[in-house]
Structures are given as C-alpha cells and as structure tokens.
Image (cartoon, helix red, strand yellow):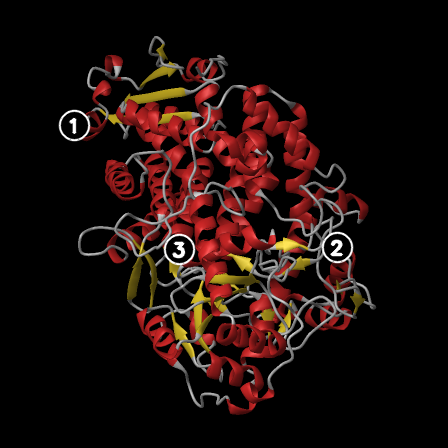
Amino acid sequence: MIRLKTIMVITYLTIGIIVNPMLVNKAMSTEGKNRLANEISPYLLQHEDNPVNWYPWGEEAFNEAKKQDKLIFLSIGYSTCHWCHVMEQESFMDHDVAAILNQSYISIKVDREERPDIDNTYMSLCQMLTGNGGWPLTIIMTPDKKPFFAGTYFPKNNSPRLVGLMTMLPQLSLMWKNDKNKLLNAGNANISSLKTASTYTAGSKIDNNIIQRTFSQLSELYDPRHGGFGDVPKFPSPHYLSFLLRYWSSAGNAQALSMVETTLRAMRLGAIYDQIGFGFHRYAADNNWLVPHFEKMLSDQAMLSMLYSEAYLATGNLEYKKTAEEIFTFINTDMTSPDGVFYSAIDADSDGIEGKFYLWSKDEIIKALSASDSALAIKIFNISLDGNYQEAGRKNAKNILYLKKPITELAKELNLSIAEMQDSITRITKDLKTERNKRIKPFKDDLILTDWNGIMIASYAKAGSAFNNKQYIEQAELAANFILTNMRSKNGRLLHRFRNGNSAISANIDDYAFLIWGLIELYDATFNTVYLKTAISLNDDLIKHFWDAKNGGFFFTPDDGTAEIRNKVIYDGSIPSGNSIEALNLLRLGRITSNSKFEAMVEKIGMVFSKNITIAPAQYSFLVNVFDFILGTTYEIVIVGDPDKDDTKEMLASLKSHYIPNKVVLFKDINNSAEITEIARYTKGQTANNGHATAYICINNACLEPTQEIPKMLELLKTKKKRFYN
C-alpha cells in the first residue's frame, strides 16, 4: 500500500538533543526468535527472527511497560506492504536499532489486517496529527497507552527529509526520563482529541442536491486524458465509478458513462493490470496506469470485478465481462484456499525486489516463446531492448507488459482478424505465465478475513447472476458457508480472521456489513431463503452490538469489545466503509421485510455524518449511492412462479440480465412459499395468475398492475420517477 508523506509530529519535540551513546552501548538485543514466533498472523511471523524483542499486542506487553517504566514503540503494518519490508530490513533487522528498542522500549508489532480495530484508532491519530497516513505506521506512547508521537516510515539514520530512528528513539527515551509530564500531557491531549473526533453530532437531512454535487466533484477530479481521478499515485477508485454508473442510469448523463468507460478501458490496457496472470495491482505511480505498485489485494479484486460486471450489464460491452472473468480466473488460481475461501493479498516484492516477478527483458520474451509469437508479443506488449519500466526515475532493461490500444484496433494494425489476435494473445500469455511461474513468487498472505471475503462473495454472486454462470455462484456459496461454519464464536457471533484452523478476534462492523452484503447478493443469485434469513440474523447482531442508539451510526467495534475508544468510520477509501455498506443493507432488508425502522436508521446515518458528506460528498460516494436509492426511482419486484417451468426461468433470467441498480427482488416459489411469506408477509396474497410466472412491481412505494409479459415488465422497470426526501 502507498507510503504517504511522513511528517514528524508534536511541535514540542525538539530534534536537537544529542544521542546518548550509553543507551546504545548498554542495550542488549534478543538472540533467537522473539515472542512473535507463536503468533498466527503471517505478518507477525515475518518478524519472529528480528533482533527486536517484539511483543504481540496484549496485556503482557503493557504490564511489562508499566513494570519497567518504559515507553511503548508500536509498529503497525501488514505482510505485503513494501515499505514495511524496507523498514524491517533497514531497522528491525539491525542490531543497533534493536539494542536501543530492547533497552529503552517495549516494542509491539500489530498486523493491521488481523487487528483493524487497533490500526483504525492509531491511523486516525496519525492523520489527525500529521495530515497524512500510511503503513508502516509508527506510534510511540506511554506505558498506559497515551500516544504522543505518530508517523509512518522512518529510516535508520537521518535523511534530508526524515529523522532516523537512531536519533529519534534515544531522544524520546531521554525525554521520558527527564520530562515525563510533557509527554504524559501530550498523550492525554491526543486521547482527548481522538475521543472528540470520534463523536459526531447530527446535522440536517441529506437532500436532493447531494447527487448532483457528488457528480460535480468527481468531474473536477477526473482525468479526461487517461481516465481515473486525481494526480499520482492513481488508484482505481471503483466506488467513484460505481456512483457514476448509477448516476448515468438514473439521470441519463452521457458524460458520467464516458468517465466510467474511459477509465475502465485505460486500466485494463495499462500495466496496473497483470496482462499475463490477470488481476489488478494496487495502484499506478503515474497518470496513465503504466507504472504499477505490484501488490495485489483481495479487496481490490472484489470491488473491481464487481464494477466490470456491472459495467457489462449496463453497456453490453463484452470486454468488461471478459475482464471480470479474468479477475475471477486469477482469484481461483492464486487466491483461493482448498476450502474455497479467499486469501488476503500477494506481495509486490519477490526475492527482495519490487515487481521482479512481473518484469521481462526482451531476451526473456524471445527465449520463452516461438519466433513468430515472440515477434508478435514484442509488438503487442510494447517490449523494448532498453526496457520500458521506470522506478524512482531510473530506467532499466526490464519491461512491464501493457497494451497501447484495444485488441480490435491492434488486430487491424497487425492485419489479423479479431479471432486470430485473441487466439494469439491467449497462447502467448499462457506460455509466458508458464515461464513466469518458474520464478520466485511473491509472498502470499493466506489470512482469511471475513470482511474482504464478504465483498468477494458479493462479487462472485453478482457476476454469477449477471453472466448466468453457476460456477461463480457455487464459489460464492462455498466461501459463505465456510465463514458461517468456521468463523463464528460459540454464541454465533462473527469472528474476524481464520488461519491454520484457528479462528479468532471479534468481528468489526466491516466483517458484519460486508458478509451481510454478500449474503443478500447470494439470495439474489439463488433465491435460497437460507441466505436471506442468515443475513437478517447477522443484521440483528450488528444493530444490537454496534449501533449508536443515542446519536446514530455504527461504531467500528462492538459494545462488548476491548477498544478503549469506540470510533465510527464513514470515509469510503479503497473499499467502502462499514457504515456505507450497512446503510445499503438496511435499505434493502427494510424493503424486503417491510421494516420501516431500518430506513429510519439509514436516515439517521445520513444525518449524523451529514456535515462531512456535505463538505466533500465524493469521499463518501458509496453512501451517496444509498441516498440515490432513496431519492431516485426504486423498484420492488416480486416474481411468483414455478422455478422448474420455462416461463419462470425466462422471466428471472431477463430480470438478471439488465442493469437496474436500485431494486429489491424477491422470488416466491408457488410450490414452497411459506419461507418467503414468513420473511415478507406482503407476498402472501401474490399468486402466479393461471399458473404462469407473474411479476409484481412497485415503483417508489406505488404498486402497479401485475404482468406476465417480460417485455412489459422490462418497460415498467425503465420508468423514472423523482421523489423528494423531506
């Protein structure tokens, strides 16, 4: 993940104190493995051989800090983080740095993916104090957890931009001995600020203008030449594009669709997309998607595969469908466990070098392929003798593979038919992948995370429904059933992570919200009421333990958790926030079950965060989608019929093959209607007229005459009705 600009925090810390050499000379480093050797997290295990005497987060570390009256050095990262690796090699494997830490600090390592609750708190602190954030995250605090210093990456020694650990650590330790009250006061002030920042006061209701204002902000951020938003580094930002796709659908705005399609095409052609093994890298370090940061995250694949699937439904462009299918191929091949559940991430580095696994010299291309295919590959993927890959402004003789033009245009240039071109690319990429797999592969983080799996389940289910692909739906079911069977406590509450047969750590809002999302999508794909019932049950747990009954909104951690500061997250970053996803869940479940309290909760979520949303709505674009659902045209559809009859199959297939984002769909099986009528009582009187499949459609809470004609059903679902949110 990106390393953002690091700023030394705390204006009262003077970088003028001379390093006390006695602190270094007297310090002793730990030999052999440290306390992390017994941990489950791959990231923590990566640090078990460090000479730093690391502790995992827990009472042992804090009790020892109090007992020895030592500062706490907290380092938070994750296993596939490039700059985390850099800091480890420079500093945490260094005996000089370890000596200082071991004598004067209690050092704690945290995996942000395993403990997002801890990371969330201290990242908020870092952003509050410095205006920036990123990983590795470095926090220094008093023995009683009062943080007074925050930053990201620090080198071992001073650099023109950053103070080094060899300077900083002795200074802070000396301040703790000589001016303890200053650090305690700073820590208390930071805790107070964090508590204040986590308290939201209700504003006004979200109004109709929010949709247009979000579009306007995204238009200002948009790069019309290369697609995407903002300057470098450039992230895919699928939630921006998802909003624009919905805005195009509801408002008929051609510019919004153009922004989506330009970006989708540019990303697929660029080197941010792995042209050989498929899947998207984390972000691009340039404007035109050609210099990737090579890390691959499950959450990115989930959001982007969902986006390309929806874009296919909206436009009928087969290239979008193909891209989604390729992402699923990558997931199935490289990120799926034998149990059918999904791993977390793949590192950017291999053999200690970022991107080494993915880069090619011209000679390597020639040796890997036949003469005719290598000549074609060099043209298609822009291979040069000097290399096209630049890192930190330095060119080398390596190439990253990308396409300058779509396959249809390349085929015309090379005087090939589209079929010939596609066959050639398929053959070339297959052979290059076989050759590439002989290399040292990047590290794979095999943590199973409930939240990220929930998004992936949603994506597989949506694509399975859109593409009429039963294998995708079965994959989603396999993953969902694994989590529901293996990642719950004895009382049925969700757990956050699973690895090597061990499931642990209380679930956060993202775990609940994202899995509920996946289960609702699974119901839409299968109409199996088990998934809907489970979603409703988990939703009850989420409301009980996370909802702020006083002010509205959901806390990140449960009411019976261990968090000292319960904050709320609303910002839609690389993935949407739990509050945004849960708002959508509440809206859909409320419409399904006729529970008006759920929609009232969505309204309250909008009010409690309205000040933030109003200032910068683009940063909350997924939540704005939810209000588009409320403010725009909403369709509630019940199909009644016999699932074994052709007319029912055709009606359902036709409904699933169209892009209708703001809809709720229920299926009532005339042979077994008890379960759905128990969940949605209003379906009790709805029948299949004369035994034929019948569609019951309500638009903005107004029900229309039922129809058995598929063209009429689809025509009704094109109806646009504005309504106002008072």
Q: Give the residue displayed 70% in from the left and 40% down from the top.
A: 227
In the rendered structure, the answer to whether residue 516 lies left or right of residue 674 reads: right
| Amino acid type at mark 1 | Ala
Q: Which residue is mark 3?
A: 117
Looking at the image, is mark 1 or mark 2 earlier in the sequence?
2
Q: Give the residue displayed 18% in from the left and 56% down from the top.
A: 490
Specify the quadrant of the image occupied by residue 685: top left
Using a 10 Å C-alpha cutoff, classify the residue at mark 1 as few (fewer than 14 neighbours), some (14 to 19) or many (20 or more): some
User: Quick one: which residue is furthest to the top in this view?
Assistant: 705
In the rendered structure, the answer to whether residue 105 lies left or right of residue 259 reads: left
Specify the quadrant of the image occupied by residue 59: bottom left
| Amino acid type at mark 3 | Asp
Q: Which residue is mark 2?
A: 380
Picture coordinates of residue 497, whole percent (x, y): 35, 60
Picture coordinates of residue 139, whole percent (x, y): 50, 64
Secondary structure, mark 3, is helix
Picture coordinates of residue 119, whole percent (x, y): 45, 58
In whole angstroms, how far apart are the C-alphas of marks 3 and 2? Answer: 46 Å
Residue 342 in view (yes/no): no
Q: Is residue 26 above or below residue 3?
A: below
Looking at the image, is mark 3 or mark 2 earlier in the sequence?
3
| Amino acid type at mark 2 | Ile
Q: Which residue is mark 1?
A: 674
